[in-house]
Image (cartoon, helix red, strand yellow):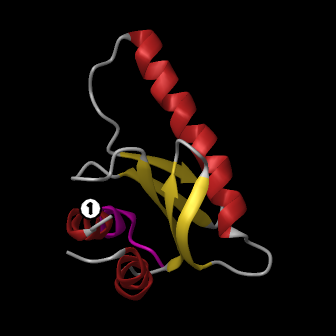
């Protein structure tokens, strides 16, 4: 089991093209930890904004009567991928991992696979 800081470091080090990562509590919108980002890309602001994305999708699923669980949400920009992965393991209720990828360097399928593996080892 890996703690939050170790998990965030592993995301940046092992996922090709990763430029930022955050562990976020979507009940409050607060980032419990961040790593990466830049002066022009504030991960705390992004974490709070993506909380609204997760909540909206959950509300929509509820209105539609969908019983499945969200694994991940992908947002594609011209030069970036934003991957939101809800934490499903023990202690992960209400949390998601938010990963920012450079689209030119990242392999999206591998990033999803690696993020799932990292999430399984996360201890919150």
Q: Residue at x 26, y 77 (%)?
A: 2
Q: How many marks?
A: 1
- Residue 41 visible? The answer is yes
Q: Is residue 112 left or right of residue 62?
A: left
In the rendered image, residue 115, in percent from the top left (x then y), is placed at 32, 66
Q: Magenta span covers which residues? A: 103-112
> In the rendering, at what x and y percent does residue 15 appear?
38, 79
Rendering quarter of residue 34: bottom right
Visible residue check, residue 77: no
State whether residue 67 is above or below residue 5.
Answer: above
The residue nearer to you, when weighing 104 against 38, is: 38
Is the residue 35 above or below the residue 50 in the image? below
In the picture shown, does residue 83 fall above or below 39? above
Q: Residue at x 32, y 62 (%)?
A: 109
Density class for disc 1 (Cα within 10 Å; few <14, some 14-19, many ≥20) is some
Answer above or below: position of 122 versus 5: above
Q: Check if residue 106 falls in the magenta segment.
A: yes
The residue shown at (52%, 45%) is 26
What is the quadrant of the C terminus in the image? bottom left
Check disc 1 and report its element: helix, strand or loop. Answer: helix
Q: Is residue 35 left or right of residue 73?
A: right
- Residue 60 within the magenta-colored segment of the rendering: no
Quadrant location, the N terminus = bottom left
Return the residue nearer the eye: 63 or 93. 93
Tell me the residue that label 1 is attached to. Answer: 116
């Amino acid at each position: 089991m890996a703690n939050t800081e170790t998990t965030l470091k592993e995301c940046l080090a092992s996922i090709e093209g990763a430029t930022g990562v955050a562990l976020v509590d979507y009940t409050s919108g607060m980032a419990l930890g961040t790593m990466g980002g830049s002066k022009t890309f504030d991960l705390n602001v992004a974490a709070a904004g993506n909380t609204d994305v997760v909540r909206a999708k959950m509300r929509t699923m509820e209105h539609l009567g969908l019983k499945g669980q969200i694994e991940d949400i992908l947002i594609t920009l011209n030069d970036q991928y934003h991957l939101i992965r809800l934490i499903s393991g023990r202690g992960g209720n209400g949390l998601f991992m938010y990963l920012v990828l450079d689209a030119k360097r990242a392999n999206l399928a591998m990033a999803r696979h690696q993020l799932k593996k990292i999430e399984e080892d996360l201890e919150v």
